[in-house]
Amino acid sequence: MYLLLRALEFAADRHRNQRRKDKVASPYINHLIMVADLLANNGGIDDPIVLAAAVLHDVVEDVGITFDDLEARFGREVRGIVAEVTDDKTLPKSLRKQRQVEHAPHLSVRAKLVKLADKIANVRDVIERPPVLWPRERREGYLSWSATVVAGCRGTNEALERLFDEEVARGRAAFAARKS
Ligand code: ZN
């Protein structure tokens, strides 16, 4: 577990100026802690490599750490998982989202676990503390797109897959209730 603490320290430092898009601009590290917490306490995952990769999953994509730097600090396996779940930011957003759907079934089991927990955390945020600029259609669209990505990750962790389904159902019910 010492690897996880080191990953948390590094991620908290590197993401220190980044905020979520919700009303109170939550610190970005909250998202990373939620992803690791979901894996450990809902998914029953105690693999320190997966938990460290969960905490570091956005560090290349969002704050420009290189994969080589990541490997030097946390090893080849963590690098590999983070690489699998990192979007290619040179691509336009719509294509990146399409790629996630296409790539999901081909991810390693460890990367699928991180992807599942990341989608649960994001869906939960879209329901409970959505980005302020997102109209309802965009929030609903996010749930649907996430579900297609998660479809490609199934057969990996029953508890996490069930939790994802519950969160999506909760979100759809909440959005429908607000419509009337
Ligand atoms: Zn994430």
Image (cartoon, rainbow, N blue to C red):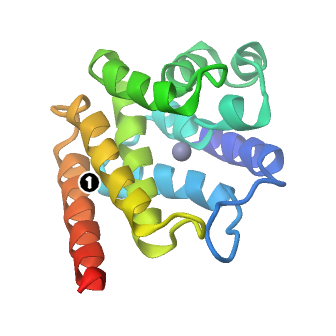
Q: Position of residue 29 (x, y in %)?
A: 67, 56
The amino acid at mark 1 is: Phe
Disc 1 designates what residue? 164
Vertical placement of residue 21 versus 14, above or below:
below
**SS for tag 1?**
helix
Is 82 left or right of 5, judged from the image as shown? Answer: left
Number of residue marks:
1
Residue shown at 43%/57% (left/top)? 138
Q: Position of residue 121 (x, y in %)?
A: 44, 56
Q: Nearer the viewer, residue 107 or 45?
A: 107
Residue shown at 36%/19% (left/top)? 103
Residue shown at 71%/41% (left/top)? 6
Q: Quadrant of the C terminus?
A: bottom left
Residue 89, by quadrant, is top right
Vertical placement of residue 33 versus 151, above or below:
below
Residue shown at 55%/26% (left/top)? 87
Q: Position of residue 152 (x, y in %)?
A: 24, 28
Residue neighbourhood size for the residue with mark 1, other residues' Cα within 10 Å, grouped as few (<14), some (14–19), many (≥20): many
For label 1, being within 8 Å of ligand 1 is answered no
* Ligand 1 located in image quadrant: top right
Q: Quadrant of the N terminus?
A: top right
Is 40 left or right of 65, judged from the image as shown? Answer: left
Is 127 left or right of 34, judged from the image as shown? Answer: left
Residue 168, by quadrant, is bottom left
Is 77 left or right of 149, judged from the image as shown? Answer: right
Q: Position of residue 174 (x, y in %)?
A: 28, 77
Q: Nearer the viewer, residue 39 or 120?
A: 120
Q: Residue furthest bottom?
A: 180
